[in-house]
Every structure is written in C-alpha cells, then in structure tokens.
Image: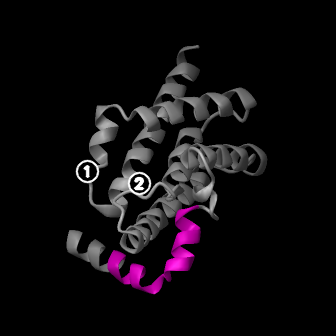
C-alpha cells in the first residue's frame, strides 16, 4: 500500500510544473507576504470560511479539506525539490488545511472565527510535543501533518468549549 501511494505521489509530482505547484503551495502567493506568511494564510482561511462558506455542509467542507491536504502534500514535495529546503516558509497550504480543520462544525460567528484563529496559530507556532513530532515525517507529509494536527487539536478544544459552556 505504501509503495502504491509513493508511486501515485511521484507520478503526480512529475505532472505538475514548478510554477503551478508553487502557486498552489503558496496559496496564490500569500506565502511570499512579509512577516509571518503562515499567519496571513490562516487569516485568509478564516475570511474565506466566514464570508464564502456560510452554508457549506460538514461533509462537503471535509471533502474540500481532504483534497486541499492531498494536493498540499504533492505541491509541497515539488516545492521542496525545487527550493532544496525541508520546510519552505513560503509553503502555506498546510495552514489553509489546518485552519479549515479547526473551523469544521463551529457555529458561524465572528467570535468562533477569532477563537479558532488564535488557538490554531498558538498551537501551530508553539508546536507542543505531539504536533512537533509530526514534522519528522518526510517531505510534504511533514509539512502538512503538523498543521493538520494543530487544526484537529484546535477543533477539539473548541468543541469541548461548546459542549461544556
């Protein structure tokens, strides 16, 4: 199974040009914004969720996040190869996927949008032990998995808050 996934991943990497892959991995060049490009992309993700994904079902939102995550692994791999960096700071598709994971199932309000953004950024920057360990996965998997974990942890924190408060 693992060999098959590596083959598919390698095949898709060959089909993507560096330019297209870079546009996707940097989320339309947001990754090149100065000072904390990951924070800018997380803010972009919250804005898209708040203004444009108002009536999206949890199932459809989950499918979008899954697709973004898979595409993120592939485009991160291409960018890693072309830059020679293990975790290029301009690659911010991981923040898009992680921030959106944090927003799944939340009441659509400004307060929850801000809470999700703040908690996700703290977890993504601080990288507590279970999150930090995921960076050790190879290439695009390491880039994506730590932010996915931060998104899941943020989701859990906010769902506990909703349930108990």
Q: Which residue is mark 1?
A: 136
Query: In the rendered image of this protein, does residue 158 appear above or below residue 3?
Result: above
Residue 107 or 143: which is nearer the viewer? 143
Query: In the rendered image of this protein, does residue 101 appear above or below residue 65?
Result: above
Tell which circle, 1 or 2, labels the residue nearer the N-terminal end. 1
Q: Give the x, y percent position of residue 1.
A: 22, 70
Q: Which region is colored magenta?
A: 9-26
Q: Residues within 10 Å of mark 2 (few under 14, many from 20)?
A: many
Residue 21 in magenta?
yes
Tell me which residue sits at (37%, 50%) in the image.
145
Mark 1: secondary structure: loop
Does residue 1 appear anywhere in the picture?
no
Secondary structure predominantly adopted by residues drawn in magenta: helix
Q: Give the x, y percent position of residue 99.
A: 55, 44
Query: In the rendered image of this protein, does residue 159 appear above or below residue 104?
Result: above
Describe residue 91's horizontal placement relative to residue 30 as left or right. left
Count the labels in the image. 2
Distance between mark 1 and mark 2 Cα atoms:
11 Å
Q: Residues within 10 Å of mark 1 (few under 14, many from 20)?
A: few
Residue 100 in magenta?
no
- Asked if the residue at tag 2 contacts the one at tag 1, i.e. Cβ–Cβ closer than 8 Å, the answer is no
Does residue 98 appear anywhere in the picture?
yes
Query: In the rendered image of this protein, does residue 81 appear above or below residue 54?
Result: below
Tell me which residue sits at (27%, 74%) in the image.
6
- Figure quadrant of the C terminus: top right
Q: Which residue is mark 2?
A: 144
Q: Give the x, y percent position of residue 18.
A: 49, 79
Residue 76 or 111: which is nearer the viewer? 76
Q: Give the x, y percent position of residue 70.
A: 44, 64
Residue 39, located in which quarter of the rendered image?
Answer: top right
Describe residue 60's horizontal placement relative to residue 18 as left or right. right
């Amino acid at each position: 199974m693992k060999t098959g996934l590596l083959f598919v991943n390698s095949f898709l990497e060959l089909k993507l040009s560096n330019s297209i892959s870079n546009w996707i991995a940097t989320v339309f060049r947001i990754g090149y914004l100065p000072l904390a490009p990951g924070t800018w992309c997380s803010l972009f993700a919250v804005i898209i969720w708040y203004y444009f994904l108002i009536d999206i079902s949890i199932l459809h939102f989950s499918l979008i996040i899954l697709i973004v995550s898979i595409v993120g692994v592939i485009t991160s791999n291409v960018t890693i190869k072309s830059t020679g960096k293990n975790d290029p700071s301009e690659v911010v598709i991981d923040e898009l996927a992680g921030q959106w994971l944090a927003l799944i199932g939340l009441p659509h309000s400004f307060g929850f949008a801000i809470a999700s953004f703040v908690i996700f950024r703290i977890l993504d920057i601080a990288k507590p032990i279970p999150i930090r360990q995921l960076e050790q996965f190879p290439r695009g998997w390491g880039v994506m998995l730590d932010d996915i974990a931060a998104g899941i942890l943020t989701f859990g924190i906010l769902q506990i808050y909703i349930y108990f408060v």
